[in-house]
Image (cartoon, rainbow, N blue to C red):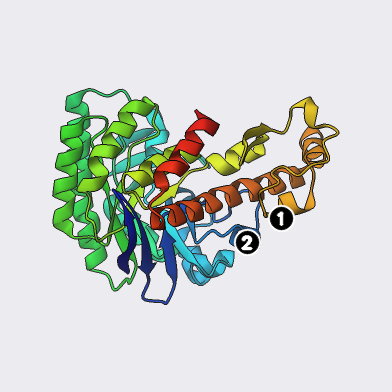
Amino acid sequence: MKFKITNTNENSRTGLMEFANGKTVTTPTFMPVGTYGAVKSLSTNEVDKTGAQIVLGNTFHLMLRPGSKNIQKLGGLHKFINWNKVMLTDSGGFQVFSLGKTSKITEEGVRFKSPIDGSYIMMTPESSIETQHEIGADIIMQFDDCTAYPSSYEDTKSSMELSLRWASRCNETHNNSNSSQNLFGIIQGGMYEDLRIKSLEKMLDFDLPGYALGGFSVGEPKDIREKLINKLAPMMPKDKPRYLMGVGTPLDLVEAISNGMDMFDCVMPTRNARNGHLFTSKGIVRIRNAKFKLDETPLDEKCDCYTCLNHSKAYLHHLDKVKEMLGCTLNSIHNIHYYQNLMKRCQKAIALQSLHRLKEELELLYK
């Protein structure tokens, strides 16, 4: 993968990711989450029409069902789900972390109890990479240990150092394969600036195609997260993609973009859509509100997504009220389209040196 900067505006930048197979991605970019190889309630055709360039798959869940070897036998994840654009798989580290007391972390890896049949499974840096090789995404992530919030300095330091040792094993396993996939490293260190900086500096020794900030959105205060991203983003390699994992709201994204981040994923647009919480040019619309029962206007008159061009707020309200699955689909189409359009607006604003104005607009809408 090659990455080149196309425009800058203070710390923010636009870029172009070019893959050996001819696929391209413009940045900043937002990746819808397709946990089991599907963005909830949407076909890949519907996801494509929102403007999405990358879909994220979950290594942990795909490993359990249908199984990475089965995906490999079926031609890889792209063919399996019928998605011909770029795919990224996470390492499974965050999901193992979220299992809590049913998992045990050692130097070797993590032993956890399967949420499907209760059997015990060992996941190591080596097996995570090998599993991602079998799944076949364009971008794969190192196996890491995610630190809970709050955590003591010593516990966080130990976790960060473990992630660095695991990163070395991931890199060795990947380099010893014939895979053409792009391995990204993950910078950890909890909410401690010095640990984050040490993690970043050590990760750079691996000279990977891209780097991510992991371990956020675990309950930390927003101001602490923003301060760390503001500090770390400009320190990350300028000639490689910078990926902020698991964050978040439209304002969170623009704030991070203004600090120099390029790639994002979050379940928020689809999860909120299923709960009638919709992002629009006028702010949040909670479609379950009774005031929309007879509202014949589009959800967002400035939006050109399928939902807004074809259906009224009254219809979306009705679908939600009767718990019709189509409501989740139409709401998700709109929210993902909103996020993709936001990325395009950021790209344009950076080119015009006006990202600060877009950020001010969103602050008024969402703060």
Q: Position of residue 268 (x, y in %)?
A: 53, 39
Q: What distance separates the C-alpha of mark 1 from that of mark 2?
A: 9 Å
Callout 2: SS: helix
Amino acid type, callout 1: Tyr
Instruction: Looking at this view, name the residue that lies furthest to the right.
Output: 294
Q: Position of residue 141 (x, y in %)?
A: 33, 54
Relative side of 44 to 69, left or right:
right
Relative side of 203 to 350, left or right:
left
Q: Position of residue 297 (x, y in %)?
A: 79, 42
Q: Residues within 10 Å of mark 1 (few under 14, many from 20)?
A: some
Quadrant assignment, res 244 = top left
Quadrant position of the N terminus in the picture:
bottom left
Regarding residue 166, the answer to whether it shows in the image is: yes
Label 2 sits on residue: 49
Label 1 sits on residue: 306
Nearest to N terminus: mark 1 or mark 2: 2
Give whichever of 235, 90 is nearer the camera. Answer: 235
Give whichever of 74, 85 is nearer the camera. Answer: 85
Q: Is 244 placed above or below 8 here? A: above
Callout 1: SS: helix
Regarding residue 247, the answer to whether it shows in the image is: no
Give whichever of 241, 144 is nearer the camera. Answer: 241
Q: Position of residue 68 (x, y in %)?
A: 45, 60
Kindly identify the residue that appears in the image at 44 percent across and 63 percent down. 135
Q: Residues within 10 Å of mark 2 (few under 14, many from 20)?
A: some
Relative side of 181 to 266, left or right:
left
* Residue 145's disc number: none
> Is label 1 in contact with label 2 (beta carbons under 8 Å)?
yes
Q: Is 80 placed above or below 286 here? A: below
Kindly identify the residue that appears in the image at 54 percent across and 48 percent down. 339
